[in-house]
């Protein structure tokens, strides 16, 4: 289970996810106010945590330096 939460996102990937998540989430408050905008919490959360569960399942990583096991 510890390999599931290893840091696997690089700086650009994390920044992009946070900006994308905030943009989508803003639609909940100022846009069409659809509950679907709450899906913005997913990229926001993964960007802030620095780990993507889907990347872990697929064995992908955009992080230049691997965290110690």
Image: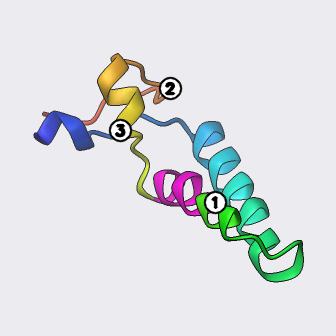
Q: Check if residue 44 falls in the magenta segment.
A: yes
Q: Is residue 22 left or right of residue 3?
A: right
For disc 1, the marked residue is 40
Please state if 58 lies on the left or on the right of 32 as rendered. left
Q: Which residues are magenta?
A: 40-48
User: Could you tell me which residue is drawn at 32 percent across and 28 percent down?
Assistant: 56
- Residue behind mark 2: 62
Compute the Cα span from label 1 to label 2: 21 Å
Q: Which residue, given by chain and number where applicable, does mark 3 sit on?
A: 53
Q: Secondary structure at mark 3?
A: helix
Residue pictured at 75% horizontal, 60% vertical? 24
- Looking at this view, is 63 or 25 the one in front? 25
Residue 47 part of the magenta-drawn span: yes
Label 3 or label 2, whichever comes before in sequence order: 3
Distance of mark 3 from mark 2, alpha carbons? 13 Å
Q: Picture quarter containing residue 61?
A: top left
- Give the mark nearer the N terminus: 1 vs 2: 1
Q: Position of residue 2 (x, y in %)?
A: 12, 41
**Dot 2 lies on which element?**
loop
Q: Residue at x 70, y 64 (%)?
A: 37
Magenta span main SS:
helix
Label 1 or label 2, whichever lies nearer to me, is 1
> Which is nearer the eye, 38 or 47?
38
Residue 68 lies, in percent from the top left, at 18, 35
Looking at the rendered structure, the secondary structure element under dot 1 is helix
Residue 64 shown left or right of residue 2 in the figure: right
Q: Are marks 1 and 3 in contact (CB under 8 Å)?
A: no
């Amino acid at each position: 289970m510890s390999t599931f939460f290893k840091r696997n996102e690089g700086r650009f990937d994390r920044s992009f996810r946070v900006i994308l998540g905030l943009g989508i989430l803003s639609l909940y408050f100022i846009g069409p106010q659809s509950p679907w905008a709450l899906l913005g919490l997913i990229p926001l959360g993964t960007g802030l945590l620095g780990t993507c569960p889907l990347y872990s399942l697929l064995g992908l990583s955009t992080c230049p330096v691997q965290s110690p096991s």
